[in-house]
Amino acid sequence: MAKSNSKDYIRSTPIQLKYVNQAKKNLIKFAMDEYRIAMQNAIDYYWLRHNLDGNYTYNELRSFGKFYPYDKEINHDSALSGRMLKSAYTQAMGMINSAIKSQMNRMYRLSQLQKSTNSTNIQQISNLQRKIHKTKLVKPTVPKSVNMTLDTNTCKIYDHTATTFNICIELSAIFNKEFKAKTFKGKNKIPLLVKTHRRYYHWLNHNGTTRLNSVLINDKTATIRFKTPKKTKDTGIKVAIDQGIKTCITAVDDNGEIFESGCNNHGYDLDQICKLMTTKTKGTKSYKKIIEHRKNYVNWAINQLNLDPYNQLVLEEIKNIGYKQVSSEYLKKFPTQLIKGKIQSRCEEKDVLFSLQSSPYRSQRCNDCGYVHSRNRNKKNFLCIKCGYSEDSDINAARNHLLVLPDIDRQLIYGINKTEGFYWNPMFDGVYTPIPVIK
């Protein structure tokens, strides 16, 4: 039995259109070109109308996404129907809202600080005003390979009973009357018969999942989307994961079971792949292949972890790697966001509660006595300079992520981990104490 939350999450799976005849592919490709032009024209129109390159207020940004007129003059010569133009405009508005979101949040924060009478906010107000003044909004550019987002007004999905093809994606009302009269002899519909795959049926048969009628489509693939309710298991144990470039993931659970990702079937691990990436030139075919290789390895490594016994997963949160430092090209290839996204996706799929936990000092903390010092850890080797506890550094860090430790005031203990060190244990009210844990 699982507890259902109020929100749902969306999962998608692409399906190849390789069995669709070339004439239909050409029509879809033509529609894509028209769709991209419509999107870019809409972005240019609204960007100029709201003066987003010049002076604008917070209220103008806030009201920007609440309305947008359907102006036929934007694409008066487009071959697309009114429904398709509406979809293009909606997608264009989403791109604009993403471009202005950060600036809008800054201006909202500034307005709240200016309403307050607290004198300590003066410096924050000054910093925000400086940031807002220096930040220039960047107008979005629609990529050539943009996916058309089609809803029930222009697209329907039917289950197909034939043995060769599984579903039919029927596109309708794609083009206007003039183009339809020149191109189509009958109805303005484009049926696409496609073959599905194992991943499609995985989500189709997933508990509580609903297939959405909206489709992301281009001339090569049609991406089907599913709505799945968020759930968490009632029973299970907790597992913690430490991520690294030498060992992609290291997991330790409440029962003491340890999982470490190793080499795949081709003999590669993440360390070797990242080193290979440094020898490739960005933009080349070989560089794109090695990026795909890295993605495949991360997916493979995380899929090896069996999540069935767990109801909660804690992942080490890594951010600002190399911040204000000169990082090597090798370290820049470490795919932290890729690892995080894949683990979170698997947790949602298996109804496991996913959470992130701050990483500072946990890799330097001795899991045996709680003593924290920078000299405890030396790459993959962990040796506590106080009690002599020895362990693989990633396993030690994962054990520390299993614990609920008091929050650290990093300003208070800044540099202490490099001098005398400190003890960090759950039974202490504070995070810094010279007293060791009593066993």
Image (cartoon, helix red, strand yellow):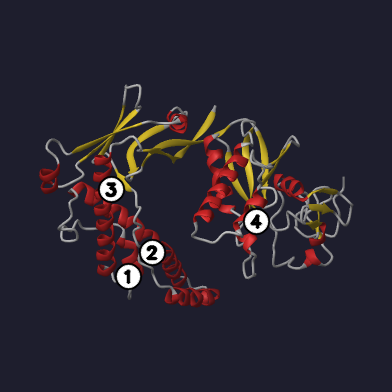
Mark drawn on residue 29: 3
Q: Do the residues bearing badges 4 and 1 touch, measured as CB atoms within 8 Å?
A: no
Query: Spatial distance from mark 2 to mark 4, Cα to Cα?
Result: 37 Å
Q: Residues within 10 Å of mark 2 (few under 14, many from 20)?
A: some
- Report x, y in % for residue 82: 18, 49
- Report x, y in % for residue 128: 48, 73
- Among the two numbered marks 3 and 2 on one chain, the one whose residue lies closer to the N terminus: 3
SS class of the residue under badge 2? helix
For mark 2, what is the residue? Answer: 100
Q: Do the residues bearing badges 1 and 2 touch, measured as CB atoms within 8 Å?
A: yes
SS class of the residue under badge 3? helix
For mark 1, what is the residue? Answer: 52
For mark 4, what is the residue? Answer: 275
The disc labelled 3 sits on which kind of residue? Lys
Query: Spatial distance from mark 1 to mark 2, Cα to Cα?
Result: 9 Å
- Report x, y in % for residue 326: 64, 70
- Among the two numbered marks 1 and 2 on one chain, the one whose residue lies closer to the N terminus: 1
Query: Spatial distance from mark 3 to mark 4, Cα to Cα?
Result: 39 Å
The disc labelled 2 sits on which kind of residue? Ile
Q: Nearer the viewer, residue 438 or 100?
A: 100
- Among the two numbered marks 4 and 1 on one chain, the one whose residue lies closer to the N terminus: 1
Question: In this rendering, would 261 be left or right of 177?
Answer: right
